[in-house]
Image (cartoon, rainbow, N blue to C red):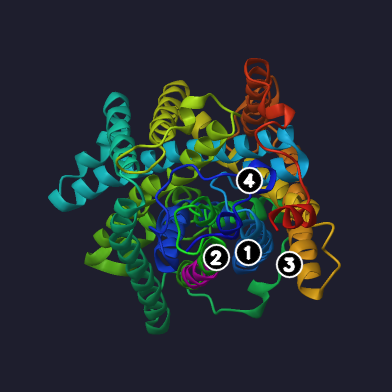
Amino acid sequence: MTSTIERAGKTPGGLSRKGLKSGSVGLLGAVVIGVSCIAPAYTLTGALGPTIAEVGVHLPAIFLVGFIPMLLVALGYRELNNAMPDSGTSFTWATRAFGPWVGWMGGWGLIAATVIVLSNLAAVAVDFFYLMLAQVTGNEALADLTNNLPLNIATTWVFIGLACWISYRGMETTKTFQYVLVAFQVVVLIWFAVAAFGHVAGGTAFNALEISADWFNPFGVESFSAFAAGISLSIFIFWGWDVTLTMNEETKNPEKTPGRAATATILVIVVIYMTVALAVLAYAGVGTEGLGAGNPENQESIFAALAGPIMGPFAILMSLAVLSSSAASLQSTFVSPARTMLAMGHYKALPAGYGKISPRFKSPSYATVAAAIAAGGFYTVTRVLSENALWDTITALGMMICFYYGVTALACVWYFRAEAFTSLRNLGLKFAAPLLGGIILLVMFVQTAVDSLDPDYGSGSSIGGVGLVFVLGCGVILLGAVLMVLMYRRNPEFFRGATLRRGVAADDLADRY
């Protein structure tokens, strides 16, 4: 189905198609890819423990509060997509609303966050790959192979290379690959939750807790810093739904399907998260010893600690689920940075090579390979320097996510400002929802930045007395600013508004017709 832009034969502010294969993804396919990118099994195994350590039994409340700004921002994203379906999403929309400098940084925030998480996804896939080999063969020594640094790095590059190859082949291959892996991890997560509740009902749980209404009370968290830390972590676990928007030039009905898929993806994920979170709390409690969810030894992977006691001989399925979740997300996460870099190359905000399309697969060829090389290089450097640096960078991801989501949400408010008060629908969806969501996320960005100045934040590492999380998070954003200035000096055309212009929704609508 053609978009309004195509039907009218006019483009607002210079928007144009980039040669991607249109109509290759429907609503179901987009939701599956969205769920895959969020990677519930991978995300939960690493995020449940640290979040419980911050907020205890109020985990469900924090998940729900973290869900609210995601939903509010998603509504704003949907309105922007309806008006300007473009694979550049945050980059394109922030440029149209605030101009090229803010737009470039919005695009950089998305690219940096996704490239960093690509390296972490590959690392987790490698860890669970060797754990799976140990479980299948009964040789526990195989699980320790992940600690062999050269072998670990080489295997990580293999996983990144395979994911890059699938992504390079376009959305049809991506979609087929994701159906199987997403279905498998969701089935295993439901199995885990049902088995945990079964132990609680049967009196065989480690430290059974009765589900209480107080668990859903966000005001029960002991401090605002703990609340902010919990929200930052919960925002990270919901992150990835916007991949459905970056596919907008490849979906059927590009003005409607991506926005609907984004909303549906968030709703599906919150149901999965709440079910598993309640199961873990009810079965293990929040204690710091044994199988307790607050035990620091269980923080890195809560499923590695609890799958055996809960699922018995079928625990290997959870290892396979986390492996498939991280592998699936590794592949689907390539969609966002590749298409954002494609758009930036297309509009001359990056070198022209990034705007190249594979003639055979109609996918971002150069940008996909560039994302793979960047992810592999980032992992190699940080892993060789310090494992703390790698994991603290993941913690700093929350800052970057809040930054570019917040900027994009406010771009919705500013772009639609001329029509925000013309109807109740516009007031709610184009003004109030994205404004509130954007403010919440930017407040979380500032709070996390302030808290991460403390050397004890994250791994406890520091540089010159400043927390490593702050140095890494703000350092990545500063690097983007430096690269932006270099791009301006090399090719100022984009920054002068010649390829993508600022605009207001009302004026763009008049220009189309």
Residue that mark 4 sits on = 90
Which residue type does callout 4 highlight? Answer: Ser
Q: Is residue 206 left or right of residue 396?
A: left
**Most foreground residue, 340 or 456:** 340
Q: Is the residue marked by circle 1 packed among few (<14), some (14-19), or many (20+) residues within 10 Å?
A: many
How far across and down, in percent of the image, does residue 207 sit? Answer: 47, 70
How far across and down, in percent of the image, does residue 354 sit? Answer: 48, 30
Q: Is the residue marked by circle 2 packed among few (<14), some (14-19), or many (20+) residues within 10 Å?
A: many
SS type, badge 3: helix
Q: Is residue 206 left or right of residue 97?
A: left
Q: Examine the structure image and report whether residue 275 is included in the region drawn in magenta.
A: yes
Disc 2 vs disc 1: Cβ atoms closer than 8 Å? yes
State the image quarter where residue 92 is shown. top right
Which residue type does callout 1 highlight? Answer: Phe
The circle on residue 266 is 2
State the image quarter where residue 204 is shown. bottom left
Q: Which residues are magenta?
A: 267-277
Q: Identify the mark nearer the N-term, 2 or 4.
A: 4
CA gap, disc 3 to disc 4? Answer: 17 Å
Q: Is residue 316 visible?
A: yes
Vertical side of 340 occupied by 55: above or below: below
Residue that mark 3 sits on = 429
Q: Identify the mark nearer the N-term, 3 or 4.
A: 4
Q: Examine the structure image and report whether residue 418 is included in the region drawn in magenta.
A: no
In this view, the mark in front (2 or 1): 2
Question: Given the current orientation, which residue lies at the most extreme left position?
Answer: 137
**Most foreground residue, 71 or 4:** 4
Residue lying at 52% horizontally and 29% vertically, measured from the top left: 389
Q: Identify the mark nearer the N-term, 1 or 3.
A: 1
